[in-house]
């Protein structure tokens, strides 16, 4: 049950990151360096890094071989 809840949380988190990328895509498409684009990029990079860390730890914990 914990593995299922973890999987669902990871999917929701990934969906949030994808939605965030979709939301700020106009800032990136303009190719101008603004404060909003920099903060959005930092937010997405930190979120992706945290997601990858949680994915790694969860795989080690819930899908041991």
Image (spheres, rainbow, N blue to C red):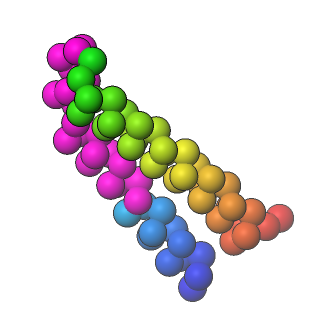
Q: Which residues are magenta?
A: 13-32
* Quadrant of the rendering where the C terminus is positioned: bottom right
**Quadrant where the N terminus is found in the figure:** bottom right
Identity of the residue furthest to the top in this view: 31
From this view, report whether residue 44 is shown above or below residue 36. below
Residue 44 % position (x, y): 39, 41
- Asked whether 39 or 8 is in front, the reply is 39
Viewer-proximal residue, 35 or 41?
A: 35
Q: Position of residue 45 (x, y in %)?
A: 46, 38
The residue lying at 59 percent from left, 76 percent from top is 3
Q: In terms of image quadrants, where is residue 21? A: top left
Find residue 51 and report its horizontal and vertical position in percent: 52, 53
Say left or right for 15 vs 35: right
Residue lying farthest to the bottom in this orientation? 1
For image coordinates 62% across by 53% down, the residue present is: 53
> Residue 43's spot in the image, x, y percent?
39, 43
Q: From the viewer's perspective, is 22 left or right of 12?
A: left
Magenta run includes residue 35 = no
């Amino acid at each position: 049950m914990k593995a299922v809840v973890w999987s669902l949380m990871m999917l929701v988190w990934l969906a949030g990151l994808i939605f965030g990328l979709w939301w700020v895509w106009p800032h990136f498409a303009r190719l101008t360096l603004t404060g909003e684009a920099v903060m959005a990029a930092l937010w997405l990079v930190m979120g992706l890094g945290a997601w990858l860390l949680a994915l790694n730890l969860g795989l080690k914990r819930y899908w041991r071989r």
